[in-house]
Image: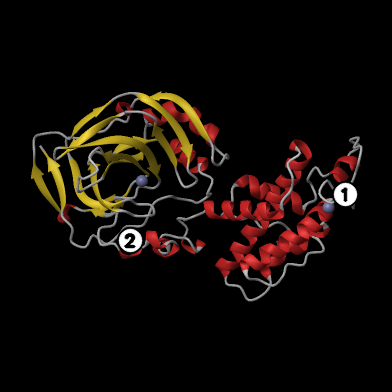
Amino acid sequence: MVDGFEWNNWLPIKVNIFGWRVTLNRLPTRNNLARRSVSIPCLNCPLCGEASESVEHLFTSCFVAASLWHMVSVWCKIRTIVAFEVKDLMHVHRYGSLNAVKRKLIQTIILLSCWCLWKAKNDLLFSNKQVSIPKILEEVKAREDEREFSYEKASGKGPEEWGKIHKEWSTCNNGKMQSPIDLSNYRVDVVHKPKKLLRNYKPCNAILINRGHDVEVQWEGHAGSIEINGTIYSLKQAHWHSPSEHTINSKRYSLELHMVHKSIDPTSKHQIAVIGVLYKLGKPNPFLSKLGRNITSLVKQDNEHRHPGVIDPREIRMSCRRYYNYIGSLTVPPCTEGVIWTISKKVRTVSLEQVQLLREAVHDHAAKNSRPLQPDHKRDIQLISP
Ligand SMILES: [Zn+2]
Ligand SMILES: [Zn+2]
């Protein structure tokens, strides 16, 4: 489409729908409300009071919009945006010699700017909040920043780029003990140990958070712990990746759950321990079924959280008789190394609907949230078996 609205998969659905309504002149501005015979005492733009509030005026000729576009241009180091019509705004990213990633970034920023401008206008109208143009720009920057990293290769913030986004994230690119890795039979040393992994979980209050790139259960108190080589690691949170991040004999499964634990001893060599469980498609996973309604209500709402109440970590059923063990890293930035990985060998089941629900709930709109396999650099991988 040449003149229509270009969907932007870096942004939440609601921002896209908003941009589409701007393009089609379907926002409830005073002008549009009056045309629909809604009685409006004053048609003037609440920002400048000088012209009637139409979509065109609000986003192009109003002095607030003009100043915002000037500041956005300076920030993005592009030619000053001059827009006479909304169409001009929606096409800014197509002009000039920008590469594909920069073009998409400009489109993202323009849409976010329109969104924040509209929000500022409503805050003035309904909450009498003073409008500050630098504040609008601050909000645009903050929202752009939320998209800190991505799983999409062509996003400019994809897994290959993580180590370059922030200095503190350089391990993502330079590390020698990164996760995930493939757990292949020929690579593992089988260790016979009759003792199971020691787990001591208990029910505890939790919140469910949409972190944008995943859905996370965060326990608010003491949800119990595991013990590895005499060190106690207490359970902090659990989240999901789809498809799985680790592969077994090169096979990638549909879903992977991570239970993240932190050492209670700040001096211990390994501070983080993660238990991973892989799932293939099949019968629904009872733990996700229980959380289902809360996850559904997270769908399409970013930065939202829910209070499902008490969540019992023991309901995440897993077999800890046979499991893989290796030292790796977090699979999201900052990709911190020295993480003790324990991956249950038994692959459990999850329904397709459950995998899809988790995918829909996150607002980054990406098709997956799993990091590609990392080189194993001849690390020791053990398969603990009774
Ligand atoms: Zn105005
Ligand atoms: Zn994870």
Label 2 sits on residue: 171
Image-quadrant location for residue 323: top left
Label 1 sits on residue: 49
What residue type is disc 1 on? Answer: Gly
Q: Nearer the viewer, residue 268 or 178?
A: 268
Residue name at image x 46 percent, y 33 percent: 208
Q: Is residue 198 above or below residue 334?
A: above
What residue type is disc 2 on? Answer: Thr
Name the residue at the bottom extreme: 97
The quarter of the image holding the C terminus is top left
Name the mark nearer the viewer: 1 or 2: 1
Q: Is residue 350 above or below residue 74?
A: above
The quarter of the image holding the N terminus is bottom right
Residue name at image x 62 percent, y 51 percent: 139
Q: Position of residue 117 (x, y in %)?
A: 72, 51
Q: Nearer the viewer, residue 262 or 371?
A: 262
Ligand 1 within 8 angstroms of badge 1 C-beta = yes
Compare marks 1 and 2 and give the one earlier in the sequence: 1
Q: Is residue 319 visible?
A: no
Q: Is 326 left, or right, of 156 in this rendering? A: left
Q: Is residue 183 visible?
A: yes
Q: CA–CA distance between discs 1 and 2? A: 53 Å
Q: Position of residue 11 (x, y in %)?
A: 59, 52
